[in-house]
């Protein structure tokens, strides 16, 4: 779908996939450029790796990863897609979406991917997870992407309260760190990113 043949003009042209790719780059490149130094500062402050992701269908797409010193490489490298309902970034954004939108994305059990045997596998289970995210103000993920690792995430919202991205931090479950402490720093970074993008503060 990246090119299309134009027989009447006897030439080739760019197809719809190229248009979608260009549109995605135009939306994400400024977000990544503005977000990268903020995530670098977050990773330095906490000593843990930080990420910035956007939603694409039922997946999240990672557009920035800032790895902390002496921390192993994670699966959340730039360009990687993961199931949104299993990640802290995805849950943060899903919780900010209208419930009707979430139902459209996850209408039945067949919509749910599984990686480690943990996490929601049915619409009702996902609703419970997202209810907790809205209550706490941040999303949690505990070994649902990679065993032994935990993450927290906070959505970045635009001027109409739509989630345009999410910031997250990942750390080892063996580290003596409280999720709420990490979440406070992540929320501060999300607020600053929103401010620099010209949007209001997140809830």
Image (cartoon, rainbow, N blue to C red):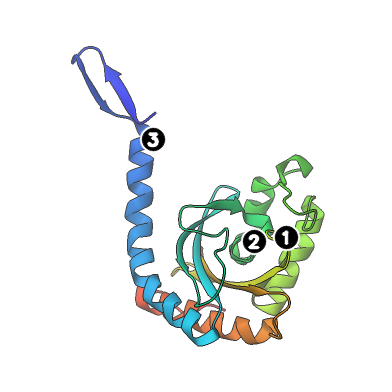
Q: Pointer 1: residues within 10 angstroms few (<14), some, or many (20+)?
A: many
Q: Residue at x 50, y 87 (%)?
A: 45
Provide residue 27's location: percent of width, then percent of height: 36, 56
Provide residue 118's location: percent of width, then percent of height: 79, 58
Task: Evaluate if marks 2 and 1 touch, with contact meaning CB atoms under 8 Å apart.
Answer: yes
Q: Pointer 3: residues within 10 angstroms few (<14), some, or many (20+)?
A: few
Helix or strand or loop: what does disc 2 sit on?
loop
Residue 161 appears in the picture as rendered: no
Which residue in the structure is indicated by mark 1?
A: 144
Q: Gap in Å between the C-alphas at discs 2 and 1?
A: 7 Å
Q: Gap in Å between the C-alphas at discs 3 and 2?
A: 27 Å
Give whichever of discs 3 and 2 has the lower sequence position.
3
Asked whether 148 or 199 is in front, the reply is 148
Helix or strand or loop: what does disc 1 sit on?
loop
Give whichever of discs 3 and 1 has the lower sequence position.
3
Q: Residue at x 37, y 76 (%)?
A: 37
Q: Judge left or right: residue 41 versus residue 14.
A: right
Quarter of the view holding residue 194: bottom left
Provide residue 11's location: percent of width, then percent of height: 20, 18
**Residue 87: which disc?**
2
Which residue in the structure is indicated by mark 3?
A: 17
Q: Residue at x 51, y 52 (%)?
A: 80
In the rendered image, which quarter contains the C terminus? Answer: bottom right
Q: Pointer 2: residues within 10 angstroms few (<14), some, or many (20+)?
A: many
Q: How many marks?
A: 3
Residue 173 appears in the picture as rendered: yes
Q: Judge left or right: residue 1 versus residue 143.
A: left
Q: Nearer the viewer, mark 2 or mark 1?
A: 1
């Amino acid at each position: 779908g990246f090119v299309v043949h134009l027989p009447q003009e006897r030439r080739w042209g760019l197809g719809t996939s190229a248009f979608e790719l260009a549109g995605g780059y135009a939306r994400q490149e400024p977000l990544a450029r503005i977000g990268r130094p903020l995530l670098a500062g977050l990773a330095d402050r906490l000593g843990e790796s930080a990420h910035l992701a956007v939603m694409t269908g039922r997946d999240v797409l990672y557009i920035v990863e800032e790895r902390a010193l002496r921390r192993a490489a994670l699966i959340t490298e730039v360009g990687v897609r993961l199931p949104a309902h299993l990640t802290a970034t995805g849950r943060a954004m899903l919780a900010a979406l209208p419930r009707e939108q979430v139902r459209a994305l996850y209408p039945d059990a067949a919509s749910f991917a599984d990686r480690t045997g943990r996490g929601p596998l049915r619409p009702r289970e996902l609703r419970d997870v997202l209810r907790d995210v809205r209550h706490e103000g941040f999303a949690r993920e505990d070994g649902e992407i990679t065993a032994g690792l935990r993450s927290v995430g906070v959505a970045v919202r635009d001027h109409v309260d739509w989630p345009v991205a999410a910031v997250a931090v990942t750390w080892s479950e063996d580290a003596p760190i409280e999720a709420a402490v990490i979440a406070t720093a992540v929320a501060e970074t999300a607020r600053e990113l929103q401010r620099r993008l010209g949007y209001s503060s997140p809830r």
